Image: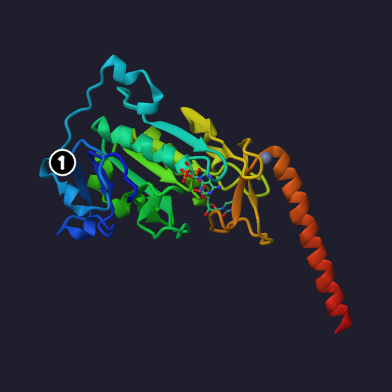
Amino acid sequence: MLPTIPVMKSLISPPFSPLSLRFPITKPFAFFSLSSKKLNLSNPKFLHINPSMLSPKPPISSTPSQQSHMETTQSSSPCGEVHVIVGPMFAGKTTTLLRRIQAESNNGRTVAVIKSIKDTRYGLDSIVTHDGMKLPCWPLTNLSSFRQKIGTDAYDQLDVIGIDEAQFFEGLYDFCCEAADRDGKTVIVAGLDGDFLRRSFGSVLDIIPLANSVMKLTARCELCGKRAFFTLRKTDETQTELIGGADVYMPVCRHHYVSGQVVIETARSVLESQKLQCGSYT
Ligand SMILES: Nc1ncnc2c1ncn2[C@@H]1O[C@H](COP(=O)(O)OP(=O)(O)O)[C@@H](O)[C@H]1O
Ligand SMILES: Cc1cn([C@H]2C[C@H](O)[C@@H](COP(=O)(O)O)O2)c(=O)[nH]c1=O
Ligand SMILES: [Zn+2]
């Protein structure tokens, strides 16, 4: 069975996404209005563009029950919000981001999702979780190009911006600041807090002082099943940025991170000394 995602009422997605390509869209962006059941987003027959979505939006009303909880982020405040979701790989960061975006959309808010162009794992124009949940997105090199790419009108109508793979974006701090403080957007950011050596990754940790909420998710240690806080790289590559999935990385608990690193570093130094010995014989 194909993966499904609960429906989006109002999603601004790129004109070149597989979903929008199936429609004769003349605008630089499209609003999709979907019915209220769970749908397979890859099936175009469930999608239709709702022209009423193109008119200016009525002011967002909020009742006390809608206001109270951060997860739905419905807010009567003119100010925006920043929510940060971090954790190791396979912890469910993208799943959580997509669920929150879906909840916002179900609340009648206009949403768009950005991911880094560096992550080519599942094609460029979709965000896909490790278990196959999928949503069209804006693949960007720079966050600063988002407003121009989406168009000023579309940007102004946006309520919620999701950012996945945030560790790969420079300018994350400025983007979140401007979007939330100046433009009143809710920004939901998902990314790795640490790299394979448990060093701070990109600017993800820098935005914590800007955040309304921070959530650190855990995965399951692939070696013992306990909670995994870290990502172990299984190969001997040493560059910080290395796109990959379960072929290259595994989530691990503290104990198995430490023992795994010892094994990897020992193997690396054995290989290095073998290379040196080979070199000295030639
Ligand atoms: N070691 C693993 N290899 C592949 N998939 C995994 C592994 N551990 C968990 N998963 C799946 O990945 C899902 C989380 O995917 P995703 O939301 O994309 O995580 P993240 O964005 O944090 O990397 C889990 O619900 C689970 O189904
Ligand atoms: C630990 C680590 C990861 N990466 C890359 C590998 C993946 O392409 C992404 C993380 O994706 P996910 O949605 O969190 O599963 O980041 C890297 O480049 N360097 C690292 O140290
Ligand atoms: Zn473990």
Residue at 71% in and 43% down: 256
Q: Horizontally, is 57 left or right of 132 in the view?
A: left
Q: Horizontally, is 264 left or right of 52 in the view?
A: right
Vertically, is 174 above or below 116? Answer: above
Where's the C terminus, which quadrant?
Answer: bottom right
| Image spot of residue 83 (x, y percent) | 45, 33
| Image spot of residue 133 (x, y percent) | 38, 46
Give the quarter of the image for residue 28.
bottom left
Label 1 near ligand 1 (CB < 8 Å):
no
| Image spot of residue 92 (x, y percent) | 48, 40
- Secondary element at tag 1: helix
Quick one: 272 or 213, which is closer to the camera? 272
Give the amino acid at mark 1: Met
Residue at 22% in and 56% down: 20
Residue at 42% in and 41% down: 95
Count all numbered tags in the image, as a single digit. 1
**Residue pointed to by mark 1:** 53
| Image spot of residue 264 (x, y percent) | 74, 55
